[in-house]
Image (cartoon, rainbow, N blue to C red):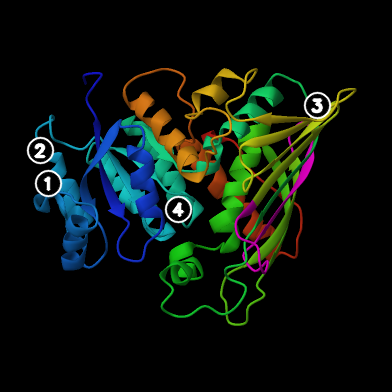
Amino acid sequence: MGESQKLRFGLIGGGEGAFIGAVHRIAAELDGEAELVATCAGSDPERARAFGVSRYGVDPTRSYGSTAELFKQEAQLPESQRLHYVIIATPNHTHVGLAADALDAGFHVACDKPLGSDLRSAEALWRLHRSLGKKFLVTYNYTGYPMLREARARVAAGELGALRRIQCEYLQGWLAGAIDGDNKQANWRTDPSRAGAAGCFGDIGSHAENLVRFVSGLAIDRVCADLSTFVPGRRLDDDGNVLLRFSGGAKGVIGASQVAFGEENALSLRIYGERGSFTWTQQEPNSLILRLDGQPMQTLRTGSSGLSVSTLAATRLPPGHPEGFLEAFANLYRNFHADIRGESGALYPQLEDGLRGMRFLDCVVKSSAKGGIWTTCDDSLDSAL
């Protein structure tokens, strides 16, 4: 592949009424390194074909009515035209099957989180992936924020000393009441057959778990979970709290809710060590609050001097020009593209991160179902083989 050649990708999902599919497309194309050339934008064949052309502007011959058609036709194209990777932006229950089909067809994969709707199928996907050796991005997009990469670098460098407490909170209020039956986003997220065994925790608690691991570098050893369903008639959790015990002795808590009335997208992370602490909030993502023993409180800002190489590499604009959700998402794709091109050191969430996330959700659901007992989380990938 020539250095100037754009990577070609296909988008599965992102049909009428969808939110995240268009975000994936924008993020993947933001740096001019890739271009959307094929779609399967929905489960209804005719609408999917029409929407791929009208909304995404792809060639009608590459706007497909089914994923089987997309994989078959794209795999038969000459190498100069064939897809390099496929984005899966569909409900949870379809992730594993579509990812397996894409890998079998010879494509790299970018898949929305969580990795799937049940642990066993996710483990089967892990085994398939290992046998085929393709690149696999799981879009835990918050790990793309520059200041979270700065926090990760400073924790790894030991600036906070031994970690003691980690607190992550993700609060939303959009499901605080009963939802109209026409709300496509709410319908599948509250349906166990499509979302899996975890509702709120599968949707946003999964982000919190990955963020805690990404910044702290610690493995979760045990969990004690209390999941709740507050809205009458809802079949999955819409609120929950999970106590965490990490290997090495640190402790923590993840709180997630989609019934926190009035909250928009209130994701925050606090990490406390023996010599200092960090605070970061998603609604003010360009600032990282650093408190070190014997020093004044500092506010580290995106784009400023003195930041780590990984932070500066994830920053596009000069200081004072806010970067946010789309740019963080795009950082994952930029790193994913670099890995596909064979460049070393690319930092992005991979399939093993998705599998650990599924293990976490499985433990949380089991713990809560048994009345909130401490449940051991197996962090070893070898057990999936």
Find numbered disc 4 in the image and state the secondary structure of the residue it sits on. Answer: loop
Q: Residue at x 33, y 52 (%)?
A: 97
Q: Residue at x 24, y 21 (%)?
A: 4
- The quadrant holding residue 269 is top right
Magenta includes 263?
Answer: yes
**Residue 103 in view, yes or no:** yes
Provide the residue designation for mark 1.
73
Provide the residue designation for mark 4.
116
Residue 304 got which mark? none
Q: Is residue 86 left or right of residue 184?
A: left
Q: Magenta part of the protein: which range?
A: 246-266
Check if mark 4's residue and mark 1's residue have beta carbons within 8 Å: no
- Within 10 Å of disc 4 (Cα), the crowding (few <14, some 14-19, many 20+) is many
Badge 4 or badge 1: first in the primary sequence: 1
Check if mark 4's residue and mark 3's residue have beta carbons within 8 Å: no
Q: Amino acid at mark 1?
A: Gln
**Residue 96 in view, yes or no:** no
Mark 2–mark 3 Cα distance, whole angstroms, equals 53 Å
Mark 1–mark 2 Cα distance, whole angstroms, equals 7 Å
Check if mark 1's residue and mark 2's residue have beta carbons within 8 Å: yes
Provide the residue designation for mark 3.
162
Residue 77 got which mark? 2
Q: Amino acid at mark 2?
A: Leu
Badge 4 or badge 3: first in the primary sequence: 4
Q: Residue at x 14, y 49 (%)?
A: 62
